[in-house]
Image (cartoon, coloured by chain):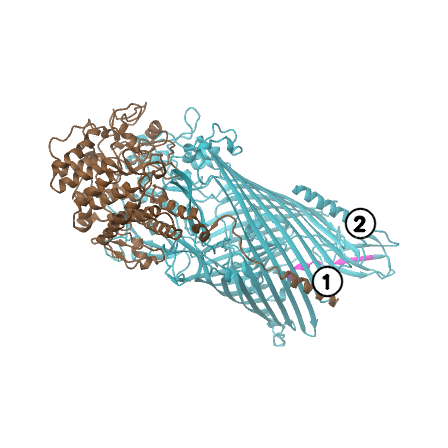
Chain colours: A brown, B cyan
């Protein structure tokens, strides 16, 4: 019997050899191997672009809700989502519009988190591309993208944490002041913008090419005075001239009944942004890459179904004072929908929106109160969650207006006239009677670039942002910067809140 | 295929049975009776020891057997103590058997049994007759109130849903709080209990203390539930039917506005007339019905000396309270035991096949601001909305953002699934010498889950409307293999008894699955059965996916039991586990335990006292681990798909780091000390035990939020914090009356439990991590120094002139800061109960029996999110509200204040069973017959205003919040139990 015991023990000992507990990964890639490959470093650059389309949870530049676009648009005189007496819509938009915000406002947090995630992805891509010895144009692209995000951060929040390498702990990142960030953005752009490919459309649709890089630089110079106190109008003008080397022109504004809004102008905001005018666009296919909620969010429930095929959200309205700045012969006025004979299709049973809005919050606006915006006439495919219109970040009309403004600011308003007139004429308007004033440019920008995410920056630059308008009373100057979100302050002890908050 | 296995098994068993009848030369006759009642025992086994001969008594208790003089007769009968009698020259034998259960003196501990008097750890045993009866669909429901320190929490009564079990509190924050389940040696998660027919359970043993659970090492930390199913014994023939039929009623309903109340409020709050669609609908009533639960089990078995088997077939059928939700479960099992090699080898085969089919009421439906289960959307639907349009189609309100018609969802959405569970196990025990036994055990379990979902356009769900119908199928395959070998040594000498167990165990679990989704169907005919009929253009990222991962666990365990003079008992064990899921250098962990017991009443100095009939002191300490909450592959930095991106003029898959590397990922370890006393007083009439424990979880696993940079992903699974649980448990049983006609026993238990998050901070790879105030949702947080799920919340103060809620500005800075660490918040209790109790009286009078279960818990707070969602008049235009909203009169609020926080204390009249055993003396074929009436959840006493005070208390996100539950049933059942 003892022999059996020994045998058993031996068998046990044999099985003890079965102590292999190594792990096999079947359904993922190991990060190190992946990024070391060429496909991997390309994917790292692509990942930066993945940040830009508007998406859920306030992620992205524009197209979706609750993020960067909303804080830069709902806080202006151009649009707001009122609470409705039917119970729809929280008060967060009304609070943005009336500038009653606190540092804990969720959308600030969303925008902030999105931008820092984007900075991180850009840092990662730069590192991966450099390590992989990638083409300099790709490295430049990643660097310009990073400059773009820092520019957006500095524009919205002023003094923000700054880092260039991902090996730093988030709570150690030092806060830099607005002027320092500005310096970084300018120097980075100046150094790398010429490395960007001078190619349009095709492979470069939706990417930073050389001219998109210069447009960004022009934007930064345009607002230099706001950022640093020192104006850079001449530099802005020179950057704009560089963009013109790309051969851009204004897209036609001709009447065309095949478009629901009756003008080819609105092709600029359609399924694909036309290459003649668009400098940088966000590619969008709903629920695949980003989404575009601009019109569906505005239209009423049944109207959404009647006009576009999906239930409208009955959200965004256009304050009447803003709308009144459009004359009736301005084709751009067709982006608004109100009254008994609205622009665009009028199927049986369409909703009549009143221009007047009685109340934004309590008890709220009546279901059909407020003019609606249909500039981004929904492009297929569309769902109740949005449509597939691409979104223009930069287009040539903006370049023309930047040039006009720079000239006026530098005192040569005569030189500015032709630029602003080109934009006006395309919109079906007469040229200006005389040389443009700053006020002319301010409102031309408002009309041309409405709902494209530029309004807050423009209002600040023209000194209008803190003035009273509509339901929004005048506020203190510190509102020209958004507060640094509470959660960011909690995470990084190096941060100081913006003054006034 | 599976049924073939089963049939083959049965044939094999039958073949073996037929071999067991032999012939002999000399004939004896006899009668087997109950020693107490002198009633004949029908079907008692009479066998000749060491031979294959045997017989079974007939209906008069008589038997006839060919024997030789000197043979030893072994007479046994289920529920009686076996007797051995030597055959002499007599030819007739009257044999009386004493009732009593051989197993009662044993408890099942991990990898073996132990005599109850030898137990040194905190172990609780529930016998079959003490398990709850009635509308029972899962063994867990049978345990409610039956064991101290074992909290069973049932959130709603959705058919097929399983209550959660927490033994001695929350041991881990990452999950893995579900106890390990062992059914006849097969190890698994809680879902293994689904394969056990409730009436086929012989006993449930619950290992609570670490000295008991440490033998299960890395899987032992949350406690262990060991289920032993009924077996047949030698000479036993039984055919048994157990059935209950229950009618299930709505136990509670919330009061919402009816149509006229809604209109009255609408006028008051300026809701436009257009929002009133003129109907009067009670949506909740429309979506609910009287449910039904049926439970049928037919069990049969038998055996001779060398072979026994038991088989059963069960059907558990439920129709839920919510229309179109039901569950059907069928369980077939067979267990056979064969002895060979002069009884030295015992082979046990265990096969089980369980098929489950469910129609689930859809969950996660609703508008952006209220996502819940379907039934809770009945609160959203306005009473003035009609159900159908005049043309018979479902009503849909285009003017309401993301409107859904809950009745259309209930009727049109297909949300069904099936699960096929199969396990087989083989156990071989070989007696090597008098002292040595060798055991081999192997089990293989496969669970295939398939589900299908189809939401047509007319279901009104937003997604279905967007895509003109959406359908998907989902398959998950689970494969769990386990093999172990044991070597046991047992020796007695003088006053010493020593027992040693050695174990090697190997486990591998593989998980695989795939998912496919189709959209845009031209009609609804094919439901989810032909996804290819959808439009290829509408295939989106995420519509096709698959996965595979696995985990391995290798263990060595040794255990020594030593007893001196039956007075001093020592148990010590050591287990070493290696698991594939940890970082390269931390795959192995050690789990030692030791415990001692002192049977004080065995001491000479206790001989003269008669206060204590039993007094035993137990002290134990053990280390256990946890890895079940940890998914495979979590120590590695991985890159996975993260949506699509447009790049280079093409749509391509975007890649992102989806997980941070943590090569330091290691075992979460729980250190537990237990002190307990078992006592018997008043000549054994009052028995009980008192246990106190302290358990600390170190290297607490958690999905910590980490800063980005430096981490490429925003969270990391790491071992950083620690957690403490302390508790006291008291179990008492008082046999107040025990006469021939009348018995009354009063049982009950009380447990007190306190937990504290000791720390959440530390460092990972040298990077300091200051984790604190981790939100669990609905104002519940993990805060260092506070219990898990502490409500850190703003204090309601009233409302302002525009009926907006106001809260207290505690730090008086004029700003209400809603940040998690805001000084405006205060701590207002915890989401987890601090005490629980049960009272379980039992009475018999002649043929009647009566038992009750009252149970309760409290000390916790519940955030009534349903009340907050249906109390703001800003929503009135698109939603119904609770009647209670009228008194509050709030238009809106920016906060989630303590206005919605309520005490969670309750007492529930869980179970009332009244049974009558019909005398079967004159019935030829029926051994026993019992009828019973059972009530479940007959009453709830609570101050909580929600549907039911049992809400999510799992210790994970969402704990302590009532976000809308499936309604609880109140059931009345009829039970029938027949033994043939």
Which residue position is annotated with label 1? Answer: B431
Q: Nearer the viewer, residue B336 or A173?
A: A173
- For the residues labelled 1 and 2, the Cα–Cα distance comes to 24 Å
Mark 2 Cα-neighbour bin, 10 Å: few <14, some 14–19, many ≥20: few
**Part of the protein shown in magenta:** B93-106
- What element does badge 1 sit on? strand
Residue B103, magenta (yes or no): yes
Whether callout 1 and callout 2 share a subunit is answered yes
Q: Percent x, y for residue A143?
A: 31, 49
Residue B276 figure quarter? top left
The quarter of the rendered structure image containing the N terminus of chain B is: top right
Mark 1 Cα-neighbour bin, 10 Å: few <14, some 14–19, many ≥20: some
Q: Percent x, y for residue B103?
A: 66, 59
Extreme bottom residue here?
B605
Task: Say whether residue B680 is visible.
Answer: no
Q: Residue at x 81, y 50 (%)?
A: B21
Vertical comparison of A260 with B775: above or below:
above
User: Residue B42 has which mark?
Assistant: none
Q: Percent x, y for residue A325?
A: 18, 33
User: Residue B19 has which mark?
Assistant: 2
Q: Nearest to the eye among marks 1 and 2: give it.
A: 1
Q: Output the chain of dot 1.
A: B
Residue B113 figure quarter? bottom right
Q: Decide which of tag 1 and tag 2 comes sooner along the chain.
A: 2
- What element does badge 2 sit on? loop
Specify whether B17 is left or right of B887: right
Residue A55, magenta (yes or no): no
Task: Say whether residue B10 is visible.
Answer: yes
Q: Output the chain of dot 2.
A: B
């Amino acid at each position: 019997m003892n022999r059996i015991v020994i045998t058993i023990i031996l068998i046990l000992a044999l099985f003890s050899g079965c102590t292999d507990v190594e792990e096999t990964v079947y359904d993922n890639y190991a990060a190190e191997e992946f990024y070391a490959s060429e496909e991997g470093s390309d994917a790292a650059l692509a990942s930066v672009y993945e940040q830009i389309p508007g998406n859920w949870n306030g992620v992205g530049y524009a197209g979706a809700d609750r993020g960067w676009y909303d804080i830069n648009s709902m806080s202006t005189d151009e649009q707001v989502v009122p609470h409705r007496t039917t119970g729809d819509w929280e008060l967060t938009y009304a609070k943005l519009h009336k500038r009653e915000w606190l540092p804990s406002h969720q959308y600030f947090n969303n925008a902030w988190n999105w931008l820092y995630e984007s900075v991180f992805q850009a840092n990662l891509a730069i590192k991966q591309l450099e390590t992989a010895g990638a083409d300099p144009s790709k490295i430049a692209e990643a660097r310009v993208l990073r400059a773009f995000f820092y520019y957006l951060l500095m524009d919205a929040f002023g003094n923000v944490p700054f880092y260039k390498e991902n090996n730093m702990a988030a709570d150690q990142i030092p806060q830099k002041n607005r002027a320092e960030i500005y310096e970084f953005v300018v120097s980075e752009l100046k150094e790398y913008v010429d490395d960007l490919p001078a190619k349009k459309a095709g492979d470069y649709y939706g990417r930073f090419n050389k001219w998109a890089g210069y447009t960004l630089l022009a934007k930064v110079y345009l607002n230099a005075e706001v950022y640093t106190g020192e104006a850079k109008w001449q530099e802005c003008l020179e950057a704009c001239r560089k963009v013109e080397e790309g051969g851009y022109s204004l897209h036609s504004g001709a009447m065309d009944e095949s478009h629901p809004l009756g003008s080819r102008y609105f092709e600029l905001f359609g399924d694909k942004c036309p290459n003649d005018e668009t400098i940088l666009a966000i590619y969008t296919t709903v629920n695949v890459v980003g989404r575009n909620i601009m019109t569906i969010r505005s239209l009423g429930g049944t109207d959404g179904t009647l006009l576009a095929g999906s239930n409208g959200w009955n959200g965004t309205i256009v304050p009447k004072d803003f709308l009144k700045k459009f004359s009736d012969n301005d084709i751009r006025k067709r982006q608004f929908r109100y009254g008994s004979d609205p622009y665009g299709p009028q199927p049986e049973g369409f909703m009549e929106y009143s221009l007047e809005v009685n109340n934004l919050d309590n008890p709220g606006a009546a279901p059909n109160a407020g003019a609606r915006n249909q500039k981004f006439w929904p492009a297929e495919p569309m769902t109740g969650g949005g449509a597939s219109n691409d979104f223009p970040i930069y287009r040539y009309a903006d370049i023309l207006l930047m040039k006009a403004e720079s000239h006026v600011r530098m005192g040569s308003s005569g030189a500015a006239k032709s630029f602003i007139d080109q934009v006006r004429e395309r919109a079906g308007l007469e040229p200006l009677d005389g040389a443009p004033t700053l006020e002319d440019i301010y409102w031309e920008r408002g009309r041309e670039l409405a709902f494209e995410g530029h309004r807050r920056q423009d209002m600040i630059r023209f000194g209008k942002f803190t003035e009273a308008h509509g339901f929004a009373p005048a506020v203190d100057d510190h509102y020209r910067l958004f507060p640094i979100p509470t959660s960011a302050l909690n995470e990084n002890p190096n941060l100081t809140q913006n003054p006034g908050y | 295929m599976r049924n073939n296995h089963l049939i083959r098994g049965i044939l094999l068993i039958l073949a073996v049975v037929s071999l067991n009848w032999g012939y002999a030369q000399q004939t004896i006759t006899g009668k087997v009776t109950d020693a107490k009642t002198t009633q004949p025992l029908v079907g008692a086994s009479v066998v000749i020891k060491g031979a294959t001969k045997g017989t079974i008594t007939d209906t008069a208790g008589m038997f006839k057997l060919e024997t030789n003089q000197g043979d030893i007769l072994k007479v046994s009968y289920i529920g009686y103590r076996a007797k051995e009698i030597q055959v002499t020259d007599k030819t007739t034998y009257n044999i009386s058997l004493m009732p009593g259960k051989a197993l009662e003196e044993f408890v099942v501990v991990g990898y073996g049994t132990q005599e109850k008097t030898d137990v040194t750890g905190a172990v609780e045993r529930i016998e079959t007759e003490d398990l709850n009866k009635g509308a029972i669909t899962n063994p867990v429901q049978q345990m409610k109130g039956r064991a101290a320190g074992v909290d069973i929490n049932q959130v709603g009564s959705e058919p097929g849903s399983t209550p959660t079990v927490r033994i001695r509190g929350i041991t881990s924050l990452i999950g893995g709080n579900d106890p390990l389940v062992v059914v006849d040696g097969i190890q698994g998660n809680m879902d293994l209990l689904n394969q056990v027919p409730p009436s086929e359970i012989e006993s449930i043993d619950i290992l609570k203390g670490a000295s008991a659970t440490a033998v299960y090492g890395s899987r032992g930390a949350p406690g262990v539930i060991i289920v032993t199913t009924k077996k047949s014994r030698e000479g036993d023939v039984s055919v048994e039917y157990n059935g209950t039929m229950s009618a299930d009623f709505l136990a509670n309903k919330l009061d919402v506005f009816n149509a006229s109340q809604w209109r009255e409020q609408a006028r008051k709050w300026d809701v436009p007339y257009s929002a009133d669609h003129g109907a009067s609908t009670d949506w909740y009533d429309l979506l609910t019905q009287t449910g039904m639960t049926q439970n049928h089990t037919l069990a049969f078995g038998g055996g001779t000396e060398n072979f026994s088997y038991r088989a059963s077939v069960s059907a558990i059928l439920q129709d839920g309270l919510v229309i179109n939700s039901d569950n059907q479960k069928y369980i077939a099992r067979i267990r056979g035991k064969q002895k060979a090699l002069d009884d030295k080898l015992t082979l046990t085969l265990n096969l089980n096949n369980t098929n489950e089919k469910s129609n689930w009421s859809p969950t996660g439906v609703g508008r952006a601001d209220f996502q819940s289960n379907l039934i809770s959307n009945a609160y959203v639907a306005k009473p003035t909305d009609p159900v159908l349009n005049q043309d018979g189609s479902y009503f849909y309100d285009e003017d309401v953002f993301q409107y859904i018609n809950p009745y259309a969802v209930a009727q049109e959405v297909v949300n069904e699934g099936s699960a096929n569970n199969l396990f087989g196990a083989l156990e071989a025990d070989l007696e090597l010498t008098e002292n040595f036994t060798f055991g081999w055990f192997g089990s293989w379990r496969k669970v295939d889950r398939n589900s299908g979902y189809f939401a047509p356009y007319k279901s009104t769900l937003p997604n279905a409307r967007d895509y003109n119908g959406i359908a998907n199928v989902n398959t998950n395959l689970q494969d769990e293999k386990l093999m172990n070998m044991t070597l046991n040594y047992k020796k007695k000498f003088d006053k010493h008894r020593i027992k040693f167990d050695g174990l090697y165990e190997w486990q591998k679990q593989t998980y695989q699955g795939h998912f496919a989704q189709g959209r845009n169907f031209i009609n609804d005919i094919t439901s989810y059965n032909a996804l290819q009929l959808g439009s290829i253009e509408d295939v989106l990222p995420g519509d096709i996916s698959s996965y595979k991962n696995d985990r391995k666990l290798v263990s060595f365990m040794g255990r020594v039991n030593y007893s001196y003079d039956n007075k001093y008992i020592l148990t010590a064990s050591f287990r070493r586990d290696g698991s594939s899921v940890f970082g390269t250098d931390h795959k192995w962990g050690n789990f030692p335990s030791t415990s001692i017991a002192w049977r004080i009443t065995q001491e000479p100095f206790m001989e003269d006292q008669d206060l204590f009939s039993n007094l035993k002191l137990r002290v134990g300490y053990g280390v256990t681990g946890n890895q079940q909450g940890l998914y495979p592959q979590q120590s590695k930095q991985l890159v996975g798909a993260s949506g699509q991106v447009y790049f280079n003029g093409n749509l391509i898959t975007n890649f992102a780091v989806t997980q941070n590397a943590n090569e330091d990922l290691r075992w979460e370890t729980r250190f537990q000390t237990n002190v307990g006393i078992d006592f018997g007083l008043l000549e054994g009439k009052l028995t009980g035990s008192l246990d106190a424990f302290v358990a600390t979880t170190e290297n607490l696993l958690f999905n910590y939020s980490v800063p980005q940079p430096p981490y490429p992903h925003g969270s990391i699974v790491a071992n950083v914090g620690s957690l403490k649980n302390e508790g006291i448990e008291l179990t008492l049983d008082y046999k107040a009356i025990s006469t021939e006609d009348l018995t009354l026993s009063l049982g009950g238990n009380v447990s007190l439990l306190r937990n504290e998050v000791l720390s959440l901070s530390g460092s990972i790879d040298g990077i300091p991590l200051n984790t604190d105030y981790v939100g669990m949702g609905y104002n519940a947080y993990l805060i260092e120094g506070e219990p898990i799920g502490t409500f850190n919340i703003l204090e309601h103060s009233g409302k302002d002139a525009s009926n907006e809620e106001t809260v207290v500005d505690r730090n008086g800075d004029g700003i209400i800061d809603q940040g998690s660490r805001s000084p405006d918040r205060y701590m207002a209790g915890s989401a987890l109960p601090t005490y629980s109790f049960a009272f379980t009286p039992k009475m018999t009078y002649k043929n009647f029996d009566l038992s009750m279960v009252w149970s309760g818990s409290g000390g916790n707070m519940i955030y009534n999110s349903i009340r907050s969602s249906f109390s703001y008049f800003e929503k009135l235009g698109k939603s119904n509200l609770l009647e209670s909203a009228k008194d509050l009169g709030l238009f809106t609020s920016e906060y989630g204040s303590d206005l919605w926080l309520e005490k969670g204390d309750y007492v529930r009249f869980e179970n009332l069973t009244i049974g009558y055993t019909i005398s079967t003396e004159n019935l030829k074929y029926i051994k026993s017959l019992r009828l019973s009436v059972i009530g479940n959840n007959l009453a709830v006493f609570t101050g909580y205003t929600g549907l039911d005070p049992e809400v999510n208390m799992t210790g994970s996100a969402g704990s302590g919040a009532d976000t809308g539950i499936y309604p609880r049933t109140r059931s009345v059942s009829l039970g029938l139990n027949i033994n043939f």
